Amino acid sequence: MSFKSFLPAVIWFIISVVLLALPGNDLPHTDFFDIPFFDKYVHFGMFLLLTVLFCYPLVTSGLDKPAIRSTFIKITVLAILYGIIMEYVQLYLVYGRSFDVVDIVFDAAGSVVGYIAITMYYHKKIGPDGNRGRNQN
């Protein structure tokens, strides 16, 4: 497992920092973004993707199941903490943005759903008997 396997996650993390730190006036205003709660869906999706991208390289890492599951949990908790920290950044450091507890809820929900999705994918890929894929004798 090398840094290259985490490159998509690191790039997405940087993109998310930029998006979450944009001043309120720089956010686009079009009819598409007038969907009710659109910003909450964006938060959910951003954190789901962030969690999955950081967890995915571990699926093929060869680590034992307990180590992978505990790392998945740590990544999920760190993603939730990152969402909380970014809300404080928006409150104190970004002009035109504010602290929103509902954003934190959707950040956390996205991270948890990402954790569930990657765990299900890992369990399906490895299988309950420890085999990788089908027809492994």
Image (spheres, helix red, strand yellow):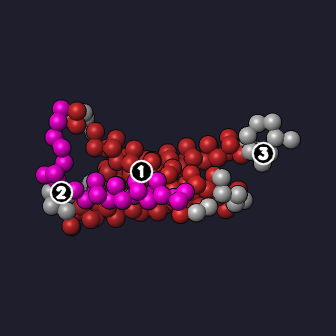
Give the vertical position of 10 relative to 123 (above or below). below
Residue 77, disc:
none
Left or right of residue 66, residue 22 in this image = left
Magenta residues (range): 4-31
Three-letter amino acid code at disc 2? Pro
For marks 2 and 1, the one nearer the N-term is: 2
Residue with the mark numbered 3? 131
Main SS, magenta region, reads helix
Q: Position of residue 72 (x, y in %)?
A: 57, 57
Q: Which residue is at the front of the view, 127 or 102?
A: 127
In the rendered image, is residue 30 in sight?
Answer: yes
Residue 13 in the magenta stretch? The answer is yes
Residue with the mark numbered 2? 23
Q: Position of residue 111 (x, y in %)?
A: 46, 51
- At a point 19% along the width and 48% down the height, the residue shown is 27
Name, please, the residue furthest toward the bottom. 92
Q: CA distance from mark 2 to mark 3?
A: 49 Å
Q: Residues within 10 Å of mark 1 (few under 14, many from 20)?
A: many
Q: Position of residue 46 (x, y in %)?
A: 38, 48
Residue with the mark numbered 1? 47
